[in-house]
Amino acid sequence: MNKLLVVTVLFALLAVSAEGFRMPRQAKDEERGPLTTFCNTIKSYYSEAVDTITDYVETVKGLKLEEKVKNFYTETTTILSTYNSILQDQLYYLFTGQQ
């Protein structure tokens, strides 16, 4: 009798704990509500937008635009500093009256 009681209790505990390990049932497309469908649609649009932007960024990096902009900035500052020096010299001689 004692063994039967122990086996029954162990079997009951096994059945209760096995119930906790059940995998949740996956909903079919027909069972999804409108909110779930809406959220999934928004998520897919967002992921497509992120992928597209990432592709554009990679394309721009491939064109080496950063290097071109740096070169343009360097050349522009060099030219402007030359003309700035010429203008300073002209103003100096204009205000001091030396020729």
Image (cartoon, rainbow, N blue to C red):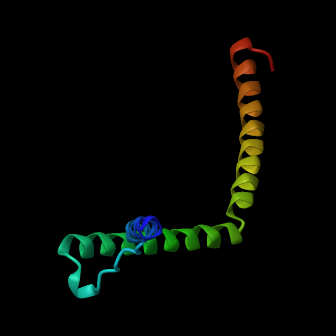
At which x and y percent is residue 69? Answer: 69, 56
Q: Is residue 27 left or right of residue 84?
A: left
Q: Quadrant of the N terminus?
A: bottom left
Look at the picture and state if 97 lies above or below 45.
Answer: above
At which x and y percent is residue 95? Answer: 69, 15
Q: Is residue 79 left or right of residue 2?
A: right
Look at the picture and state if 98 lies above or below 32.
Answer: above
Along the viewing direction, whichever of 32 and 95 lies nearer the viewer: 32
Tell me the residue at 23%/79% (across/down).
32
Seen as rendered, the residue at the extreme right is: 99
Along the viewing direction, whichever of 26 and 58 lies nearer the viewer: 26
Look at the picture and state if 6 lies above or below 73.
Answer: below
Q: Is residue 53 left or right of residue 93?
A: left
Q: Quadrant of the C terminus?
A: top right
Tell me the residue at 75%/45% (across/down).
79
At which x and y percent is residue 72? Answer: 71, 54
Look at the picture and state if 81 lies above or below 9.
Answer: above
